[in-house]
Image (cartoon, helix red, strand yellow):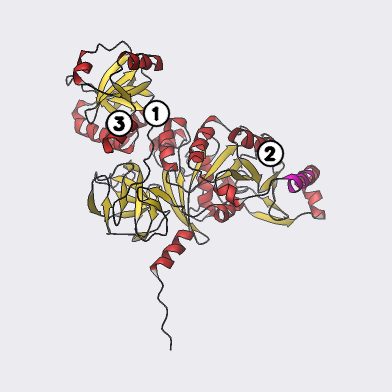
Amino acid sequence: MSLPIEKSSSDELAREVARRRTFAIISHPDAGKTTLTEKLLLYAGAVHLAGAVHARSHQRASRSDWMELEQARGISITSTALQFDYQGVRVNLLDTPGHQDFSEDTYRTLMAVDSAVMVLDSAKGIEPQTKKLFAVCRKRNIPIMTFINKMDQPGRHPYELLEEIEQTLGMTAVPFNWPIGEGAGFLGLYDLQEPQVLFFQRTLHNQKRAPMRVETFPHPSLAETLGEAYGPLQEEIALLTGAGTKFDRDRFLAGQLTPVFFGSALTNFGVEPFLNAFLQLAPPPSPRMSSRGLMQPTDEKFSGFVFKIQANMDPQHRDRMAFLRIVSGRFEKDMMVHHARLDRKIRMTRPHRLFGRDRETIEEAYPGDVVGLVNPGLFAIGDTLCSGSPLAFDAIPQFPPECFGVLRSQDLTKQKQFQKGLQQLEEEGVMQVFYSPDHVRREPVLAAVGELQFDVVASRLETEYGVKTLVERMPFVLARWVTGDPDVIARIYWPQDTRRLVDRDGRMVMLFGSERLLSYCMKEYASLKFQLREEIEKIQNS
């Protein structure tokens, strides 16, 4: 009698890695990113009714946009982790803000994914924010799948959209399906991988899965069903199958080619075929470069990095959550890990699986997963955690602020809440906080990538910390950290349109009203160094 062979931990790790998919959805505002996110959750069975971006009396708000200001304005303000299972695959979906004022949060999130879905508006095509986010993906060679949305509305011809992708982004576009009709006459899709036509039906408020009917092509009955759309469809299919570019998986994985899908996220047309194709095409967790060399997901030693901090996700707990992307090995509850920045061992006592603002305690997780760690002040963006000898991953990029404003509390009796809120929002990377070196004037100066961040700070200070504030805009456009001989700095009479401040660590920061003024000061005070925050911190940490 033979004894059962015990499953090896390395085999289990390999299987778990193979079934992970971790991706972000990127787009310009209003292209339909949040709506597509919600519909992917619907088709995966993660939600039972799809919500609208704008909450109504009979509709839920979007599951991914949980912040009060997000629901009020109908935009995504902060990145959200949504983990769910579909057809045996563990999916980690990171929903990102589309508005350019929240680019920094999006860029940090793109450091944590293995692939991306680019959503385009069929009428507008490639828009400015799409180009910026694509540039970040290209820098990391992130594979991109494209979903051309809003085919149920008047838009540009599919050929024109494919040509724009190739010319503007320099990436080969390979359609996997093709729209039948457009605008009000959008009837369905032709599947270019199988000779078949996919028909869809609308549902009440578009909240349930759209029933899909599949018919082989060509078929005599289709000429009557499609009417005037039948002739053009035949011609386009002949052209695409005869002269179209073939899909090359290696080029896709290198970020040089994008498979393109058409549909309407609002009406659910094309969402299910896209989700099924995504599971087949998107890569599992990929290796990451570290100070120890290339870390393979299947390496036995655990490693991961923090790419996001979020306070007050759950109003019942009022705690801070660190988002940890697992890179290698098996993560276990209560395991001891090395914290690289603090150079000490810590215990992973309260790990969570995240689904928007909802959470549940987990016992284990694997590469590709995003784990929520309750943060009592131990974690910061970019921190590396690992078992075994210490290591560090590539630094998460920081972006120089372009907007500045004085933050004034409207209730001086709530200084404790005011300071706590300011500290926690700065830890999240929502903005940076500067102060006057004159201790008599200690009103904080906010520095942000985009002006809408000021609205976020004021709204969250009021709703989460009970403090009403006002932000008074300042006429500066850039900041530099200044270092050099203290005696030289003390003798300088700085020109108008500048402001001398210090950051939380007491380092000197100068604000400038123009690039021209910065260039003048750099030339006039050549013995001093004018650096970005990222540059000065790299020097201090080396």
- Name the residue rendered at 29%, 51% in the picture: 390
User: In what quadrant of the picture does the C terminus appear?
Assistant: top left
Q: Nearer the viewer, residue 436 or 68?
A: 436
Residue 316 at x, y = what percent?
A: 29, 47
How packed is label 2: few (under 14 Cα within 10 Å), some, or many (20 or more)? some
- Name the residue rendered at 33%, 31% in the picture: 535
- Residue 361 higher or lower than 109, as above or below: below
Q: Is residue 470 visible?
A: no
Q: Which mark is residue 449?
A: 1
Q: Which mark is residue 536?
A: 3
**Chain-order first, disc 3 or disc 2:** 2
> Which region of the structure is painted magenta?
235-245
Quote the CA–CA distance across marks 1 and 3. Answer: 18 Å
In the rendered image, residue 189 lying in the magenta stretch gets the answer: no
How packed is label 1: few (under 14 Cα within 10 Å), some, or many (20 or more)? many
Q: Nearer the viewer, residue 368 or 460?
A: 368
How packed is label 3: few (under 14 Cα within 10 Å), some, or many (20 or more)? some
Quote the CA–CA distance across marks 1 and 2. Answer: 35 Å
Q: Which SS class for mark 3?
A: helix
**Chain-order first, disc 1 or disc 2:** 2
State the predominant SS element of the stretch in magenta. Answer: helix
Q: Decide: marks 3, 2 in contact (CB < 8 A)? A: no
Give the residue type at disc 1: Val
Q: Residue furthest left?
A: 440
Residue 165 at x, y = what percent?
A: 62, 37
- Residue 225 higher or lower than 135, as above or below: below
Give the residue type at disc 2: Pro
Give the residue type at disc 3: Ile
Quote the CA–CA distance across marks 3 and 2. Answer: 48 Å
Please give the residue where the numbered disc 2 appears in the rendered image.
Answer: 158
Q: Which SS class for mark 2?
A: helix
